[in-house]
Image: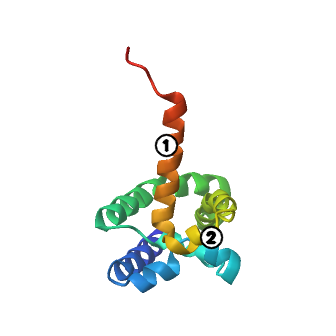
Amino acid sequence: MIIILIALTSIVSFLAFSRNDLFDKLQFNAWYIKHYKEWYRFFSYALLHADWAHLIINMFVLWSFSSIVLSHFTIIYHGAAGLHFLLLYVGGTIFSTLYDFWKIRKIYITMQLALPELYRQWCLQALYFIQTEKYFSISYQ
């Protein structure tokens, strides 16, 4: 099962590296989820990676930690360890986007249409960082 997840993720990411239309169709985008009911985006974004380094590191980590998790799940759930791992994987994928979906749905329509989701998240994180730095800056005097 882990091999299938790694193969599926690698294939989709590889295809999306050269096809911007595929990347745009699969990436998490709260605007499209909310207004066009493209609910699959809660799942499909997990198959995308920014570049080769990102893909290779994530697949290595998935391979490394999945064996540990599966061995523990085998002790706890016996024959249903694979099913529980898949539920953990899919549940984590969905759960990791819920806050962003809730937060981003309040952004004005102009920002929703002006910037692709990936860049918008970077901008929001940068603004948050600047805001927190302003209030929590360290004085070296």
Q: In what element is the residue under mark 2?
A: helix
For residue 11, side relative to residue 107 (left or right): left
For residue 137, side relative to residue 33 (left or right): left
* Dot 1 or dot 2, earlier in sequence: 2
* Above/below status of 91 relative to 34: above
Q: Which residue is mark 1?
A: 129
Q: Residue shown at 47%/68% (left/top)?
A: 2
What is the three-letter code of the residue carrying label 2?
A: Ala
Q: Is residue 62 visible?
A: yes
Q: Residue shown at 42%/80% (left/top)?
A: 12
Q: Position of residue 15 (x, y in %)?
A: 36, 83
Q: Position of residue 10 (x, y in %)?
A: 38, 74
Q: Is residue 84 visible?
A: no
Q: Position of residue 75 (x, y in %)?
A: 61, 53
Q: Nearer the viewer, residue 7 or 50?
A: 50
Q: Which residue is mark 2?
A: 30
What is the three-letter code of the residue carrying label 1?
A: Phe
Which mark, residue 141? none
Q: Position of residue 56 (x, y in %)?
A: 32, 63
**From mark 1 to mark 2, how far is it between C-alphas?**
22 Å
Snapshot quadrant of residue 20: bottom left
Task: Specify few, some or many for label 2: CA neighbours under 10 Å numbering under 14, 14-19, or 20 or more.
Answer: many
Q: Nearer the viewer, residue 138 or 19?
A: 138
* Above/below status of 24 relative to 42: below
Q: Nearer the viewer, mark 1 or mark 2?
A: 1
- How was this image coloured? rainbow
For residue 62, side relative to residue 44 (left or right): left
Q: In what element is the residue under mark 1?
A: helix
Q: Residue shown at 30%/67% (left/top)?
A: 52
